[in-house]
Image (cartoon, grey):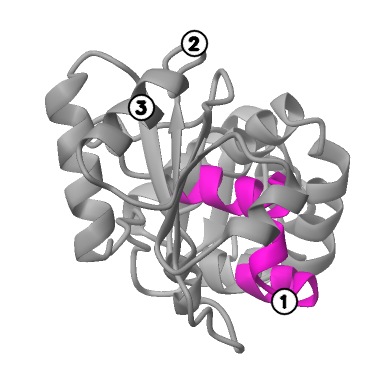
């Protein structure tokens, strides 16, 4: 019969496994059982809560509590900007990120905030102009790094293009998902200059520990930003 202590001894806490990897571990623990029996056992372990599904084809040993989906706690300014854009352009795709959101995961906190609006391609310029006309100061449209550094001030709003196939919230499409945030802060030339890059692995570790993060979804988006291998290396080194 299957011995749970033997199975769990081969599973590393906080490591993500595919379904096939889980079945292989079950077969190693009880080699006398067939693949079908191991698939049945995997289903039973999911039902009992011994292991949990964290994303598509992603499984982890249970730590006793289900990780919540990340919901960003925006500043009043960012929330107001989001509401104004959504009211003016109710049918466009856009997301909002602000650098102070990283403070939940950083050792060295971001003191001065920057708000990033990513809007679907060909719409960013309209959003930029609307925010200017609506009275917002210090709004930049797709600035070069040198211009951002030169003209930046507190609560600057930066409007850029939304990368296609970005992971979006189904119910709150303008709020940034954890998968998107973890990739953007690594890839975006402006965002990554607002915190110490040495803290990126720590941010990833904290995010995966506190929230439900879909690794496959995250790496798919990293591929769109041409950083899949680099980010996968961080995940493998930091989480395994």
Task: Report the Cα–Cα distance between label 3 and label 2.
Answer: 13 Å
Dot 2 corresponds to which residue? 122
Q: Is residue 179 magenta?
A: yes
At horizontal 42% and vertical 52% (from top left) the residue drawn is: 138
Magenta region:
178-203
Q: Quadrant of residue 221?
A: top right
In the picture, the quarter occupied by the N terminus is: bottom right
In the picture, the quarter occupied by the C terminus is: bottom right
At horizontal 28% and vertical 55% (from top left) the residue drawn is: 78
Dot 3 corresponds to which residue? 129
Dot 1 corresponds to which residue? 199
Is 16 positioned to the left or the right of 165 in the image?
right
Q: Who comes first in sequence, dot 2 or dot 1?
A: 2
Toward the bottom, the furthest residue is 107
Is 199 positioned to the left or the right of 116 in the image?
right
At horizontal 34% and vertical 51% (from top left) the residue drawn is: 137
Which dot, 2 or 1, sits closer to the camera? Answer: 2
At horizontal 37% and vertical 19% (from top left) the residue drawn is: 126
């Amino acid at each position: 019969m299957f011995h749970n202590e033997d199975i769990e001894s081969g599973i590393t806490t906080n490591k993500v496994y595919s379904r096939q990897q889980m079945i292989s571990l079950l077969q190693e623990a009880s080699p006398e059982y067939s693949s079908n029996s191991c698939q049945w056992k995997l289903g039973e372990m999911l039902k009992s809560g011994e292991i949990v599904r964290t994303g598509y084809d992603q499984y982890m040993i249970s730590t006793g509590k289900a990780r919540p989906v990340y919901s960003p706690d925006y500043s009043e300014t960012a929330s107001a900007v989001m509401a104004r854009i959504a009211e003016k352009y109710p049918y466009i795709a856009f997301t909002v990120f602000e650098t102070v959101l990283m403070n939940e995961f950083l050792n060295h906190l971001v003191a001065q905030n920057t708000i990033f609006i990513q809007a679907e391609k060909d719409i960013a310029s309209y959003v930029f102009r609307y925010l200017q006309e609506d009275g917002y100061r210090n709004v930049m449209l797709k600035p070069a790094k040198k211009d951002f550094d030169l003209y930046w001030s507190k609560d600057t709003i930066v409007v850029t293009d939304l990368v296609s196939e970005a992971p979006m919230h189904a119910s709150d499409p303008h709020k940034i998902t954890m998968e998107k945030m973890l990739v953007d802060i690594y890839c975006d030339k402006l965002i990554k200059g607002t915190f110490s890059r040495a803290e990126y692995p720590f941010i990833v570790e904290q995010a995966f520990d506190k929230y439900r993060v879909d690794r496959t979804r995250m790496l798919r988006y990293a591929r769109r930003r041409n950083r899949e291998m680099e980010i996968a290396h961080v995940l493998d080194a930091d989480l395994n």
